[in-house]
Amino acid sequence: MKADRGTAWIHVGLLLIAAALFLSAYNEMASHEARNSAQQVIEQLCETLPTESTAGTEAPAVPEYLLDAGREMPVQTINGRDYIGVLSIPSLELELPVISQWDYPALKVAPCRYSGSLYQDNLIICAHNYASHFGKLKTLQPGDTVQFTDMDENVVTFRMVERETLGPTDVEGMEAGDWDLTLFTCTVGGQTRVTIRFEREKD
């Protein structure tokens, strides 16, 4: 009887190991596909971003978004999805396009705007915890910087100031506080949200 129980537990253990290996392989494959998708979008966005001013044409002294913070963020449509810009995280060696509106299929392609606007200093961006997306977000340290480039080629730099752990349905907590930029992703298993808060660098 004891031998049968032991054999059963061995089989259960082997099944759990196989399931873990399958899940790990699936996540790695999804991360690889997400990396390729993001890179393809980045290449196309680079082709569509405004070029530098030609000779004899001066850029405006004050960017338009500073004059009209309430305006919508411009978008560029790639493969049927609207993108609001490119997020660069130098310390993680990441450069990622950001989709204008989030949904679960979109999150498999690239990080998405969860809410807010770059121009109103309340932008929140979410992404899967793929290694090629926000999987290493928790390793950011206070003082680390990120940059966001919008579709008008305005570049804004932010500095990390705080890390929080929030519940998976804590929308109020996610949107609380006077943060200029928030990046977040789920932990393995989706039990909590790694949440990184940033302040805009002063010009």
Image (cartoon, helix red, strand yellow):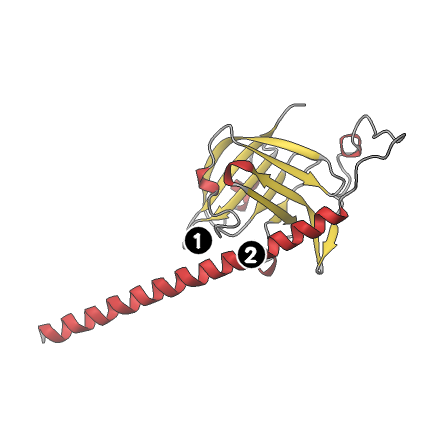
Q: Which mark is residue 27?
A: none
Q: Nearer the viewer, residue 143 or 188?
A: 143
Residue drawn at (59%, 61%), measured in percent from left and top? 105
Q: How many marks?
A: 2
Categorize mark 1 by other alpha carbons within 10 Å: few (<14), some (14-19), many (20+): few
- Residue 15, image x and y in percent? 29, 69
On-image quarter of the N terminus = bottom left
Task: Find residue 200 and report its horizontal and vertical position in percent.
Answer: 62, 29
Q: Is residue 117 left or right of residue 175?
A: right
The residue that mark 2 highlights is 34
Q: CA distance from mark 2 to mark 1?
A: 19 Å
Residue 100 is at least partly visible in this image: no
Between circles 2 and 1, the one closer to the viewer is 2
Under mark 1, the amino acid is Gly
Circles 2 and 1 in contact, beta carbons < 8 Å: no
Q: Looking at the picture, which amino acid does disc 2 mark?
A: Ala
Instruction: Pick the quarter of the image with the C terminus.
Output: top right
Residue 93 visible, this angle: yes
Please provide percent x and percent y for residue 63.
78, 31
Name the residue at the top extreme: 203
Of residues 195 and 177, the one nearer the viewer is 195
* Disc ID at residue 190: 1
Disc 1 secondary structure class: loop
Residue 71 versus residue 12 in the image, above or below: above
